[in-house]
């Protein structure tokens, strides 16, 4: 699969590309008011959900195809390109018929290979740009599989949207960013255009700016941000939407790093990281050799592999030690969990 950089007619490659608009198209007046305000601030691509998949029935699920003419009017009156989410072949047919310029596929749909294949089949023969959101669960291969289905339909103008990953546990974020997953996707497909959705990651309007800055620092190509003319009274996702004025201020405060600039200093620092990584790997190899010796001892003395008290002590003590060294305790705990799992695997091999 050879995916090039996303091409959007009339939009240059200058980073970042901004897509903005309300979570949902609620009324003609709301859509046009928001679009005209965004256009006056230089936004070139307008987004609005026409069909809204909700977690539970009974909530606002979008106005449906009746809202598509509103997006067409946005294009006619402002010159903005328009975009919306599609989840079924019917959505695809109606959106293309209405002249929508860009389609995106939502996280719930991406998690369903059957739904993705139906969308891919419906998109055959078109050349409309498609943005594929990450699936709700942190599964990189599932995300790639969804992209491959669209690619297999002959679509070559493909980009992705990182909107974070759902978690049962309540955290600071609505959806955990887990930046290492989109970073790995970009490593595998360096030319793949990547957008960040700070609205859905944060879930709160005050988190949009710092998340957007993190995305730009990670060299994301663009941002898709929810903006509403009256966000406090929005029918969906009110807490995470910005007014056009606040969005304009937020964008003006973002720092765009110049990726073309490299210095001798950063080369030296990267060399130091390479050397430390080699030391880390050597230390891990030594630790696993000791784990093998422990596995042999346990086998000879008929002891169980898993010593739960010891495991809990390791996690607690290493987290405290890491915190004393100014490391994130959660980060340290995750590393130690992975190391312990590998140690157990090594010892199980000895027990065979």
Image (cartoon, grey):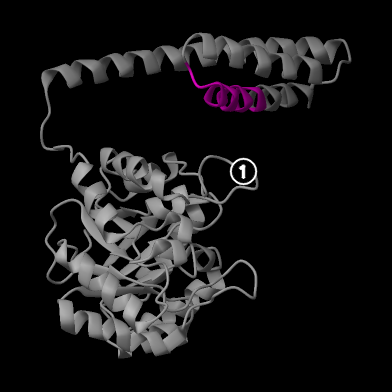
Q: Is residue 114 left or right of residue 68?
A: right
Residue drawn at x 82%, y 15% as measured from the top left: 299
**Secondary structure category for the residue under label 1:** loop
Residue drawn at x 63%, y 26% as measured from the top left: 337
Q: Over which residues does the magenta segment extend?
A: 327-341
Pick the front one: 133 or 171:
171
**Residue 112 drawn at (x, y percent):** 56, 68
**Residue 178 drawn at (x, y percent):** 47, 41
Magenta stretch: includes residue 65: no
Q: Is residue 310 left or right of residue 184?
A: right
Magenta stretch: includes residue 340: yes
Residue drawn at x 44%, y 61% as measured from the top left: 232
Quadrant (top left, top right, bottom left, bottom right) of the C terminus: top right
Pick the front one: 298 or 185:
185
Query: What residue did someone put label 1 on?
Result: 170
**Residue 34 drawn at (x, y percent):** 29, 70
Q: Is residue 309 left or right of residue 344?
A: right
Residue drawn at x 24%, y 85% as measured from the top left: 73
Answer with the quarter of the image where residue 262 lies.
Answer: top left
**Residue 217 drawn at (x, y percent):** 27, 38
Regarding residue 40, the answer to whether it shows in the image is yes
């Amino acid at each position: 699969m050879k995916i090039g950089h996303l091409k959007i007619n009339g939009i240059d490659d200058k980073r970042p590309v901004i897509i903005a608009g309300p979570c949902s198209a609620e009324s003609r007046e709301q859509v046009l008011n928001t679009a005209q305000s965004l256009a006056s601030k230089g936004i070139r691509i307008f987004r609005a959900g026409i069909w809204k998949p909700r977690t539970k029935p009974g909530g606002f699920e979008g106005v449906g195809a009746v809202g598509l003419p509103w997006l067409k009017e946005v294009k006619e009156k402002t010159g903005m390109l328009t975009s919306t989410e599609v989840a079924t072949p019917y959505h695809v047919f109606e959106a293309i018929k209405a002249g929508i310029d860009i389609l995106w596929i939502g996280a719930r749909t991406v998690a369903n290979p059957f739904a993705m294949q139906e969308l891919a089949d419906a998109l055959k023969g078109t050349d409309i740009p498609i943005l594929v959101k990450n699936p709700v669960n942190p599964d990189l291969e599932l995300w790639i599989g969804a992209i491959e289905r669209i690619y297999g339909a002959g679509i070559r103008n493909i980009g992705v949207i990182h909107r974070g990953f759902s978690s049962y546990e309540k955290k600071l974020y609505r959806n955990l960013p887990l930046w290492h997953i989109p970073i790995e996707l970009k490593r595998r497909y360096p030319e793949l255009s990547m957008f960040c959705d700070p609205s859905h990651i944060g879930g709160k309007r005050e988190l949009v700016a710092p998340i957007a800055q993190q995305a730009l620092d990670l060299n994301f190509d663009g941002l898709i941000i929810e903006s509403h003319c009256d966000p406090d009274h929005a029918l969906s996702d009110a807490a995470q939407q910005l007014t056009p004025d606040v969005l304009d201020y937020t964008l003006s405060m973002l720092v765009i790093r110049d990726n073309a600039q490299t210095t001798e200093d950063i080369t030296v620092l990267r060399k130091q990281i390479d050397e430390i990584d080699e030391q880390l790997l050597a230390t891990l190899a030594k630790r696993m050799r000791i784990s093998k010796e422990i596995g042999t001892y346990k086998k000879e003395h008929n002891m169980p592999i898993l010593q739960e008290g010891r495991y809990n002590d390791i996690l607690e003590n290493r987290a405290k030690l890491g915190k004393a060294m100014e490391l994130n305790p959660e980060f340290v705990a995750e590393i130690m969990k992975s190391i312990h799992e590998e140690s157990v695997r090594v010892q199980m091999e000895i027990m065979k």
